[in-house]
Image: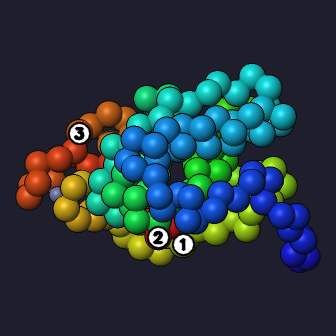
Amino acid sequence: MTTPTLSKPALSTPSAAELAALDKAALHARVHQRVEAAWQLAREVYPALPLPKVWLDLRGKCAGQAHFGRQGLRFNPVLLAENRLAYFVDVIPHEMAHWLVHHLEEGERMPPHGREWRSVMRRLYGLEPKVTHMFDTRGASPAPYRYECGCQSHHFSVRRHRLAHAGKHYVCRQCRQRLVLCSEKVI
Ligand SMILES: [Zn+2]
Ligand SMILES: [Zn+2]
């Protein structure tokens, strides 16, 4: 297997100092701009791709999430504030790549960090498709799906994950928040 050479990142890299100087409102506005820039690039591959909505409402250890039911991308404002450059360089294109792959024909059936997603990361965004945390897709773990609330991680079996995916709500006993699937720890 050959390792493809990477071109430089397709989106311009902002300066860390400039990002560090932004207040919360300005930082969040920049996230929206960055999502739009990543979306513009994705439209070169798939012109009909809808612009996702953006929420900064994830908590816990979950860095980002493409939420197809809600038609948008969710990010974690606390992790964003602490890891600004990583979000602009990596996390936002990472989630947009999920958004794009999901909208391709048969995309819903493709594995989250599978061949198509990696190809979008490399070829479209010029990024190494890093997945520092994801489900154990080899099925070695009895509870391979990680869900997050506001306070901890919860590991779901395939069966429980299917129920959650079908709409069943699970709530954390400690913090009472609804559990959301998290495939990305990233940071
Ligand atoms: Zn909790
Ligand atoms: Zn991912």
The residue lying toward the viewer, choosing from 80 and 4, is 80
Task: Name the secondary structure under disc 1.
Answer: loop
Identify the mark nearer the N-term, 3 or 2: 3
Instruction: Please give the label number shown on residue 132.
Output: 1
Q: Residue at x 53, y 57 (%)?
A: 19
Q: Residue 23: x and y, percent? A: 40, 50
* Crowd class of label 2 (few under 14; some 14 to 19; many from 20; radius 10 Å): some
Closer to the N terminus: mark 1 or mark 3? 1
For image coordinates 90% across by 71% down, the residue present is 5
Q: Is residue 173 above or below residue 45?
A: below
Residue that badge 2 annotates: 187
Residue visible at 60% across and 38% down? 33
Mark 3 lies on residue: 169
Residue 107, located in which quarter of the rendered image? top right
Type of amino acid at the residue the image marks with label 1? Thr
The quadrant the N terminus occupies is bottom right
The reply to whether callout 3 and callout 2 are in contact (CB within 8 Å) is: no
Is the residue indicated by label 2 positioned so its CB lies within 8 Å of ligand 2? no
The residue lying toward the viewer, choosing from 32 and 106, is: 32
Q: Amino acid at mark 3?
A: His
Give the x, y percent position of residue 63: 43, 58
The vertical placement of 15 against 103, above or below, is below
Q: Secondary structure at mark 2?
A: loop
Marks 1 and 3, how far apart in space? 27 Å
33 versus 138 height, above or below: above
Image coordinates for residue 153, horizontal then vertical, percent: 28, 65
